[in-house]
Image (cartoon, rainbow, N blue to C red):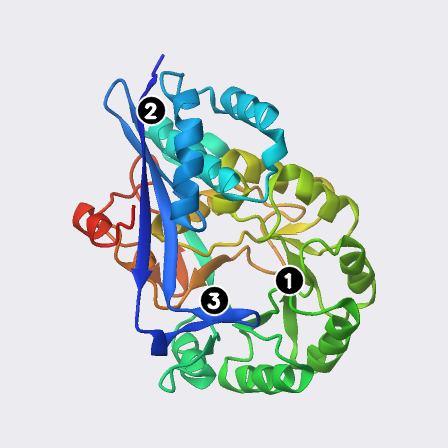
Amino acid sequence: MPLIKRLSFIGLEYAFAPEKAYGMSRGGGHRRQGGLVEVETDSGVLGVGEAFGNPLVTREYFRMVEPMFAGQSVFDFDHVEARIRNAMYHLGVGNQLTACLAAINVALWDAIARGFGVRVCDLIGGCGATRIPAYASTGFFSSDPDRQLEHMLAEAAAHPYAGAKIKIGRGIRDDVARVKLARQMLRPDMLLMVDINGAYTADVALECARAIEPFGIHWIEEPLPPGDLRGYAELRARSPIAIAAGEAHHTVRDFRALIDGRCVDIVQPSIAGTGGLTEAKRIATLAHTQNLRVAPHAWGGAVGLATTCHFIAALPATPHTGHPPHPLMLEYDMSDNALRTGLLRTPLVLEAGHVLLPDGPGLGIELDRDAVERYRLC
C-alpha cells in the first residue's frame, strides 16, 4: 500500500507593472498568486496539485493539516479530510483550508495515477475526450491603454474558440456598450458570455439581463453575491438569459443549496477552491441528477488548468449522447499570468480553439523547477 512519505507547499506570485493592472467589476490588481502542494510516496512517486488564493494564508493551513496526512495511505484522503473537517468545523469551508485540501486531493490523484501508469481522468470517470473545447476568458477592465476591451476582443477573435467571456458590471449603459462591441468583433457563431462578479442586486441584474439579451448572450456569470441564494432563484425565474455561478461557492453542501434551490442554469465548481477533484465530481453528479449543465471555473495556474482538462474529459455526456446543443467548454484565461504560461516544462497545447489533454500518466505535466523558483513567494 503506497504511503505518503512527504508533503510540501510552494507559494507562488507573479507580479507585473501596476500600470498594467487588470480585473473585474469589483476591482483589479497587478499580482497573480497561487500555491502548489507536492506529495511524494514511499515508492518515490511525485504528485502535484494547485491551491487557489493567497499562498501566505494557504501555507498556514497547510502547516496545520500536513501532519494528519503524512504517513497515511495515498488512498485515504476522504478519511483524513473528514477528520480535519470534523475537528475544525468552526473554521468553516469558504477559506484557504478548502483550497489547501483541494491541492492535496489533486496531488494524491496525480500520484496514484502515476503509480498505476494511467491518466487522472481514467481514474475519476474515464476519458471521454482528448481535445477540450475552450472559450476565451478575456475582456477585463484594464488600466493599460494598450490593452483595452477592443484589443482583447481582437485577440480572442483571431482564434477559433467556441466562445468568449467578458467582464461587465459597472452599470447598465457600460454593460450594453461592452456587449455591443463584443458582438460586433466576434464571429456570429461564437458564444458570448458575460461575468458580473457578484456586483449587482437582483433588480439591477434583471435590468442588465433584459438590456443585453438582444445581443445573444449565452450566460450571465455571478450576477449576484454568492450568499444571495433567494435573489439567484428569483433572478433565474425571470431572466431571459441563463444564469451561471459557483466559483465563490465551496464544497458540495454549498452547491446543494444552489442546485436544489434552482438558483442557476449552469453549475461552475472551481476545482482549486472546492476541495479538489473528489468534491468537484460530487458536485457534478449532483448537478446532473437535477439535469443542470456543468461548466467548471478555471482561474489560476497551469496545474489547475491541466486538472480542469482531466475533470472535463471525465464528465459523462448528459442528458444527450453524441449531439450536445452546446459544447462543454474549458475556461481559457487570456490574461497576463506567468503562473499559467511559464510554469511547465512542456506548456499545455492550444490547437484550433481546443486545449489538448496532456499526454502521459497522472496529470501528464512536469513542473519547470527553475520557473517555480523564479515565482516562489514562500
Residue 222: image tag: 1
The residue at the point 59 percent across, 75 percent down is 168
Q: Which residue position is annotated with label 2?
A: 116
In the rendering, at what x and y percent does residue 31 appear?
37, 63
Residue 121: tell me if it is visible: no
Residue 136: image tag: none
Front residue of 176/13: it is: 13
Q: Is residue 289 above or below residue 15?
A: above
Task: Name the residue type under label 1.
Answer: Glu
Number of disc labels: 3
Secondary element type, mark 2: helix
How far apart are labels 2 and 3 at the CA level? 34 Å
The residue at the point 65 percent across, 67 percent down is 220
Task: Name the residue type under label 2.
Answer: Phe
Task: Name the residue type under label 3.
Answer: Ser
Q: Earlier in the sequence, mark 1 or mark 3?
A: 3
How far apart are labels 2 and 1 at the CA level? 39 Å
**Circle 1: is it few (<14), some (14-19), or many (20+) Cα within 10 Å?**
many
In the rendering, at what x and y percent does residue 230 appear?
81, 55
The residue at the point 33 percent across, 46 percent down is 11
In the rendering, at what x and y percent does residue 263 appear?
75, 54
Residue 7: tell me if it is visible: yes
As drawn, the residue found furthest toward the top would be 1
Assign the C terminus to one quadrant of the image: top left
How far apart are labels 1 and 3 at the CA level? 14 Å
The residue at the point 26 percent across, 26 percent down is 45
Residue 180 vs residue 164: left or right? right
Q: Which residue position is annotated with label 3?
A: 137
Secondary element type, mark 1: loop
Secondary element type, mark 3: strand
